[in-house]
Amino acid sequence: MTLRLFFCTLYLMSQKSRKTALFFLFVLGFFSLATAQKVSMYTRVGSTGIIKKTLNEGDATFGGMYALFYGSVTLANATVVVKTRIKLSETAAWNELKTSAVLEKAYMGFDMPFLPELRVYGGKGYALTLPGGFFTLPELYGAGVRWGKDGIALNYRKGGLSCGANFTSTTTATNLSEALQFGMGASFDFAAQGLSVPLAIGVSALYDNALGGSSAGEAKDWTCAFFAQFKPKSEKDTFVSGLSVGAGYCINGSTMTSNATYKYVENYDTFKTKALSHTHIFTLISKAKIGSVSVEEEAEWGTAFDEPYYSVYGGLRLKIPVTEILRLWPTAQYYCIFNGDDSSKSRDSLVLCPRVVAEKGHHLFSMGAVFEHRETGADTYCWNLKIPFYYKYTL
């Protein structure tokens, strides 16, 4: 059944969405040939492969599939980015397959002629962030780190200083009226200013008037964060090559474990999300290289304001070269939400992912297995299995 679903994938994907994505990339590429300083384009096809929700039962299903198209053009005073994803849903039967298309990024940024240090962004998916707050394993920004994403943004850059503001409004399924969202951030890179200090610091403030005011157990309107990143340019400064350490604090942010998209822990949407979207959050992210092995560490601790809920996230990944084109990427991640007064409301999950990556020239192939030991009820656990893979071709 799984093989049949797999080979039906490309045929069943939305023809209209695929043509739209290719059209965008074609226009982007054609325009870039004459004017661009830097062009980046790639396509990526992948799947979650087989999913078994309980290892000792015959419940294997097809994990869905996706095709991703990305293109960016960087000019001397502007940038244009388009990224779209076409998805085939997870299912247990071929006649239940569903498709969807998501425009993940579509934005332009350009410098103002009268003030070249000021860049204006417009569209969806741009990344205006504080230094040191990106989780590379789940590919997410920490709470409060990304102060500009959708809408219209202004970003002033001069020397080591970067600051700006972002304005947008959205309508969601749970909020039928449009709500103002506002973000602002400022960061300073001492090294970029010519100083001998390999340190960057930043602060942000985010406002969303759809978040519910100040009633207990609900997210407040304001989120604020402070982050710093220590990143020496030379191994002589630290005796460890490739060292980078980022740390930060966020007040009134949402924790990694309460993420509504990835659902890292069981029953995230019943009694935890409201409490854990109003928290103190501490983050530590570091990278280093020991010999030929790269080590990546991530950690987040969250404490809810109004209820005795605590959140813990920890991740560790090694990148081990085997041959010139082959690498091993073993990963371990731990997610936990626990209640200080009632342990029956606590849940956790341990994720182990052995992974092989092969890369040569324009081609990259990745395949692994994801073993998850998930708590489905109070002191009740089960093992889940996924076998994800993807192929990426860079133009």
Image (cartoon, rainbow, N blue to C red):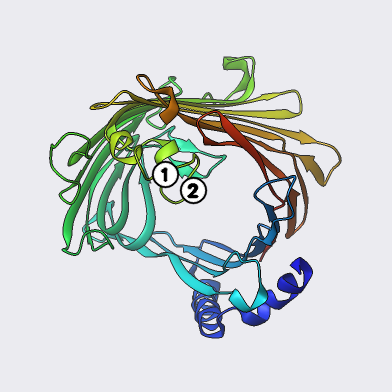
**Residue in front for this viewpoint, 16 or 204:** 16
**Residue in front for this viewpoint, 241 or 14:** 14
Q: Left or right: where does residue 173 sit relative to residue 299?
A: left
How far from the left and from the top, in percent, is residue 63? 64, 60
Q: Is residue 190 visible?
A: no
In the rendered structure, find residue 259 and report the number of the disc placed on it.
1
* Label 1, residues with CA under 10 Å away: few <14, some 14-19, many ≥20: some
In the rendered structure, find residue 201 and report the number of the disc placed on it.
none
In the rendered structure, find residue 262 and report the number of the disc placed on it.
2
The image quadrant that residue 219 belongs to is top left
Q: Is residue 135 visible?
A: yes
* Label 2, residues with CA under 10 Å away: few <14, some 14-19, many ≥20: few
Q: In what element is the residue under mark 1?
A: loop
Q: In what element is the residue under mark 2?
A: loop
For the residues labelled 1 and 2, the Cα–Cα distance comes to: 6 Å
- Asked if labels 2 and 1 touch by Cβ distance under 8 angstroms, the answer is yes
143 in relation to 104, above or below: above
275 in relation to 301, above or below: below
How far from the left and from the top, in percent, is residue 242? 61, 27
Q: Callout 1, which amino acid?
A: Asn
Q: Residue at x 30, y 36 (%)?
A: 253
How far from the left and from the top, in percent, is residue 334? 56, 30
25 in relation to 330, above or below: below
The image quadrant that residue 216 belongs to is top left
81 in relation to 248, above or below: below
Q: Residue at x 25, y 61 (%)?
A: 113
Q: Quadrant of the N terminus?
A: bottom right
Q: Quadrant of the C terminus?
A: bottom right
How far from the left and from the top, in percent, is residue 104? 44, 63
